[in-house]
Amino acid sequence: MKYGVDPEESVPLNITITTRKTEDGSIITIEDTGPGIDDAGNNDQPHTAIRNIRKRLELMCHGTLTIQNRHSSGTEAIIFIPDNY
């Protein structure tokens, strides 16, 4: 797995990946304990990689990607893939 982390960060980075099935599809949640993400993850001009992932999810399976800072610390990315695509 590749994961963007500052190599000079002194705090260990923990990554948790969970999946769950809903009535409408599947949810994949990736959480980390890093410093969080700036607002560029969800505003009108997101990072190129994030924009590309969102486009691929939409084109391939009508999926979505939501990225937000966690309340304690770190970032949470939620991928939703609907059953009927």
Image: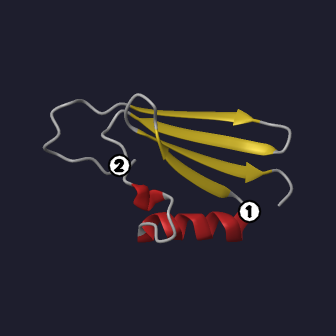
Q: In this view, does 25 lie to the left or right of 34?
A: right
Whichever of labels 2 and 1 marks the residue nearer the N terminus, that label is 2
Q: Where is residue 4 in the image (x, y as percent from the top left)?
A: 31, 51
| Residue drawn at the location 38% of the way across and 49% of the way down | 37
Total marks shown come to 2
Which mark, by number, is residue 3? 2
Q: Where is residue 16 in the image (x, y as percent from the top left)?
A: 47, 32
- Residue 44 or residue 9, whichever sits in front: 44
Classed neighbour count for the residue bearing mark 2: other residues with Cα under 10 Å, few (<14), some (14–19), many (≥20): few
Relative to 79, does residue 56 appear above or below in the rendering?
Answer: below
Relative to 20, does residue 39 appear above or below in the rendering?
Answer: below
- Residue 44 or residue 29, whichever sits in front: 44
Q: Where is residue 17 in the image (x, y as percent from the top left)?
A: 52, 35
Image quarter of residue 57: bottom right
Q: Disc 1 residue type? A: Cys
Say which element carries label 1. Answer: helix
| Residue drawn at the location 36% of the way across and 51% of the way down | 2
Classed neighbour count for the residue bearing mark 1: other residues with Cα under 10 Å, few (<14), some (14–19), many (≥20): some
Q: Do the residues labelled 2 and 1 touch (CB within 8 Å)?
A: no
Q: Give the Cα distance between marks 2 and 1.
A: 24 Å
Which mark, by number, is residue 11? none
The image quadrant where one finds the C terminus is: bottom right
Give the residue at mark 1.
61
Q: Is residue 84 left or right of residue 79?
A: right
Q: Disc 2 residue type? A: Tyr
Q: In this view, does 72 lie to the left or right of 35?
A: right
| Residue drawn at the location 37% of the way across and 53% of the way down | 38
Q: Position of residue 10 (x, y in %)?
A: 15, 33
